[in-house]
Image (cartoon, grey):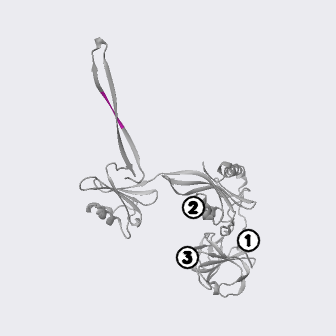
Amino acid sequence: MHNYFKLILPFAFVLTLFIGCKGNGASGGDTATDSVVVVEDLRIIEYGVDVTDLNEVQGKVANGQIITSLLRNLGANQKTITQAAFIPDSVFDVRRMKAGNKYSAYYTQDSVPQLVYLVYQHSVTDFIVFHFEDSLHVEQFIKPTSIKTRTGEFVVETSLWNAIVDADMNMELALQLSDVYAWTVDFFGLQKGDGFKVYYDELFVDTVSIGISKIHAASYKRGDKELYAVFYENDDVSGYWDLNGNNMKKAFLKAPLSFSRISSKFSYARKHPVHKTVRPHTGVDYAAPMGTPVMAIGDGVVTFKGYKGGGGHTVKIKHNSTYTSAYLHLSKYGKGVVEGARVSQGQVIGYVGSSGTSTGAHLDFRIWKNGTPIDPLKMESPPTEPIPDNARAEFDSVKTVMVNILNEELCIMHCEL
């Protein structure tokens, strides 16, 4: 059977048959019976080609397999195999064929089947179609995508991931929401009862979801406090804003890496896991896999890069006259990170490791304000520019619509618009 994208085109052929005539015109006894016979011809179109009378063989690209060896295994002739080695990169870069990707080969139903088409799945939407009728011809086929605009709500009980799964929503929402609220919500410190509402576009190929294309608006609630984020753009500005028109982006990210879990919080009296003595721990430990990218929380200048005792491989960044941050126990440093170099917010300055005095892979993250260590989880980030005055009226209109959609009673849990 054909298991991929199908387009069935019916063609009706109408044949009018005059079955017979009895009598003659003089007697007025003429009897004519018209019988309409409809013959329906069904063609099966897959990936833009007619595969109606062909047999399909499905498979996956083997480890180390290249296009020429795949064609040889599928029974292509030597001339075709040679031509395949010289396919222009603009059509298909044969070096990008990946092990594990699926393909479908289509053969004639002859006693000796002949290979007619090969369809290689490069991604969920992108396919490469090889034609073998006369000489080799290669073209790209892109499956159409559709967008469904949806709303949903979930409450954290055990974790953000589980909350999204329980609400039957796309897992990519967790990553997208963490991007929207990266400057304002500590995703490492989510608590039971924290809730999110979100109004978003989800992409589909056929009936399969392939991701979230855009979040239009969202809200995050803890206790009686609710923080909205509304997307708004014009010719001059673009981004997410709170209900007062303040930019959701701040001078500093809430966390220096994609959220995982916190293993040790800021404390002046923590029992050291190695030395077993009680001593201050003026930072936050983020447990994360070895090699996880570590990002600068804000723009600044690298004031230290090197091995620093128990802290192991360390990077220290001075952001302004008030704030300085440090990243300890790194496994290696980011590209271009040297003392005196300027770094940008979100730039990778190193990778999680276990260098120095450490019991396992984690990041020890520290902040100083005016030379005094502060709890990174409680740091208030300086604001950035709000909505311009000349856009305020339009933003307020957009904001009102978005908040109404998020709070629509019919969409309390999960609905599709």
Q: Position of residue 112 (x, y in %)?
A: 24, 56
Count every numbered label the image shows and give the total. 3
Q: Amino acid at mark 1?
A: Lys
> Mark 1 highlights which residue?
378
**Disc nearer the start of the sequence (3/2):** 2
- Amino acid residing under circle 2: Glu
Foreground pick, 366 / 276: 276
What residue is rendered at 70% in x and 87% in y? Answer: 277
Residue 147 spot, x, y in % from top left:
54, 51
* SS assignment at label 3: loop
Element assignment for label 1: helix
Badge 3 amino acid: Gly
Mark closer to the chain start, 1 or 2: 2
Q: Is residue 332 left or right of residue 77?
A: right
Specify the segment rendered in magenta.
12-17
Earlier-in-chain disc, 3 versus 1: 3
Q: Which residue is mark 2?
A: 172
- Residue displayed at 32% across by 65% down: 68
Q: Nearer the viewer, mark 3 or mark 2?
A: 2
Quadrant hosting residue 359: bottom right
Secondary structure of residue under mark 2: helix
Image coordinates of residue 308 in percent, x first then y, are 63, 85
- From the viewer's perspective, is the residue at label 1 or at label 2 nearer? 2
Structural crowding at the residue carrying mark 3, measured as other residues with C-alpha within 10 Å and reported as few (<14), some (14–19) or many (≥20): some
Cα distance, mark 3 to mark 2? Answer: 22 Å
Q: Are marks 3 and 1 in contact (CB under 8 Å)?
A: no
Marks 3 and 2 in Cβ contact (< 8 Å): no
Residue denoted by label 3: 291
Residue 75 versus residue 40 in the image, above or below: below
Q: Does residue 122 appear to the left or right of 280 in the view shown?
A: left
> Residue 237, can we see it?
no
Q: Residue furthest top?
A: 26
